[in-house]
Every structure is written in structure tokens, then in C-alpha cells.
Image (tube, helix red, strand yellow):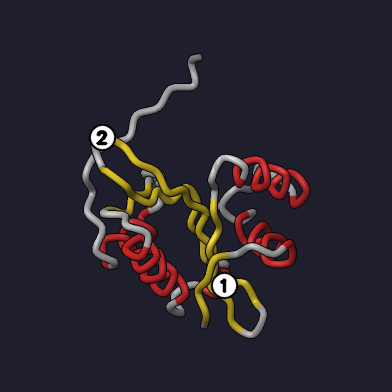
Amino acid sequence: MLAQLLTTNAELEAAAKVLLQLRPQYDLESILAQIHKQQALGYLLAGVTEHQHMLCVAGFVVSEKLAWGKHIYVDDLVTCEAHRSKGAGRLLIQWLKQYGKEIGCGQLHLDSGVQRFSAHRFYLREGFDITSHHFATADL
């Protein structure tokens, strides 16, 4: 298994197909358009591949905030359903941590839906702590 930044059109399309498992409100064309739109704002994709199959994908941004300093925030993280519990997610988290260190980040953050219990167990096993409650409103 190999974890790396995804930059080519073929890599982005393979990543998009995996991201659709997390973001089913999109189709392939619309998720690729959204990825390109977000890339213009700093969105990056990393993935784990094996034998030319995309196993796991993370979409993230590098940012700075008063609260966290320079950090990586993972917007999207999903392992292809057919490849779960085989180490791809763990490899990608390790890659994200190493990448963050290399570019001078001090923290790695993500949010996870309250109903995603197996994901929470995974994040806790990977050294994450539950540090806050995230509040949101669509009443704008």
C-alpha cells in the first residue's frame, strides 16, 4: 500500500469514486467539479492505493487559526467499503501526521458525524481525542 498526495486527473477521478461513498449527494461529475472548485481554495487530496486501486481518501486543507496555530483540517476521510479494516485508513492517518510535521503543522483536526460510531472508535485508536462539540446552523 502506498499513501501519497493525489494530483493527476486519473488519481482525482479514482478518489472521487471513493468519496462518493461518504458524499452520496453528488454524482461523479458534480463531485469532481466541487473538488476542482475547492482545490482553487487550497483543498488537497491524499490517498492510499494498492495495485492501482484507490483504497482510502482524505480531503484536507492546511490552515492557521488563533486556536490551533498551523494545522491540517481533514474535511473528508473515507475508506472504500470493500477495503475497510485492512490498514489503509491507519496508513493514511499516519501519512497525514507525517505530512503535517514536514510542513510545520502542530495539529491534525477533523469532525465526525455523531452517528459514525465505528469511525469514532478508529479515530480514538489512532490517537485522536474528542476536544469539542461542533455547532452549525444552516439558518443564514
Q: Using a 10 Å C-alpha cutoff, classify the residue at mark 2 as few (fewer than 14 neighbours), some (14 to 19) or many (20 or more).
A: few
41 relative to 34 in the view: left or right: left
**Amino acid under disc 2:** Leu
Task: Give the x, y percent position of residue 37.
Answer: 66, 40
Element class at badge 2: loop
Q: Quadrant of residue 94?
A: bottom left
User: According to the image, label 2 marks what residue?
Assistant: 66
- Residue 119 vs residue 73, the one in the foreground: 73
Residue at 33%, 49% (x, y): give it: 71
Give SS at disc 1.
strand
- On the picture, is 123 further left or further right than 46? left
Q: Is residue 104 or residue 139 the one in the foreground?
A: 104
Q: Which residue is mark 1?
A: 55
Q: Position of residue 120 (x, y in %)?
A: 33, 56
Whole-percent x and y of residue 2? 52, 80
**Residue 20: horizontal and vertical position, in percent?**
64, 54
Instruction: Name the amino acid, label 1.
Output: Leu
